[in-house]
Amino acid sequence: MSDPATLRFAVGIFDAWADVQTSIGELIAGGTAQSAFSVLGLHCALAPIVVHAIDGMSLLDLPFPRNRELVASTIGPVADRLAAKLAGKAETLAAALGCWLIPRHAAQLEQAVSAGKFILWVQLFDNDDERRAYRSLLARSSNSVGVHDVIGT
């Protein structure tokens, strides 16, 4: 990537927190930095888990006005970019994600969050990162795994 404001992520949808935690642990053991992970979900699902489950992770609430429940993300580049879209008057999580994703993918991620699922974003720096992330996410996620570029704030 030539634009430093563009970040690349592997993204997987998980039904269970245990699977998120297993993927994170596996990827850290393989050399992925703790700072490469972001988790997106409902505040009510993430808050009780993240506080106790992952050292150094804390949440940023993302109160999109037209989402029925409060969305949250672990602090990091995904949360920062979503917060910027919220400040720019994005009405829903799908609208914020729609700045980077096609509408169908943005809606799919919003629906997964609304259903209480966890979205794990793994920042990728090279092809090896991408292969490792794909293997881990595909083995445990409940849906397809995608790679998405998130541009600027």
Image (cartoon, rainbow, N blue to C red):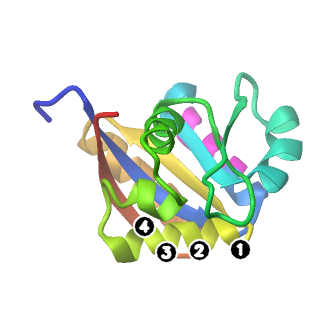
Q: Earlier in the sequence, mark 4 or mark 1?
A: 4
| Mark 4 residue type | Ala
Q: Position of residue 16 (x, y in %)?
A: 75, 64
**Pointer 4 residue:** 106
Is most of the magenta stretch helix, strand or loop?
helix
Q: How far is disc 2 from disc 1 in space, using C-alphas?
A: 6 Å
Mark 3 nearby-residue class (10 Å; few <14, some 14–19, many ≥20): few
**Cβ atoms at labels 2 and 4 below 8 Å apart:** no
77 displayed left or right of 110: left
Of residues 68 and 24, the one drawn nearer to the viewer in this rendering: 68
Q: How far is disc 2 from disc 3 in space, using C-alphas?
A: 5 Å
Q: How far is disc 1 from disc 3 in space, using C-alphas?
A: 11 Å
| Mark 3 residue type | Gln
**Pointer 1 residue:** 115
Q: Secondary structure at mark 3?
A: helix
Q: Position of residue 69 (x, y in %)?
A: 75, 61
Q: Secondary structure at mark 4?
A: helix
- Residue 98's place in the image compared with 32, above or below, is below
**Cβ atoms at labels 2 and 1 below 8 Å apart:** yes
**Pointer 2 residue:** 111
**Cβ atoms at labels 4 and 3 below 8 Å apart:** yes
Q: Which residues are magenta?
A: 21-30
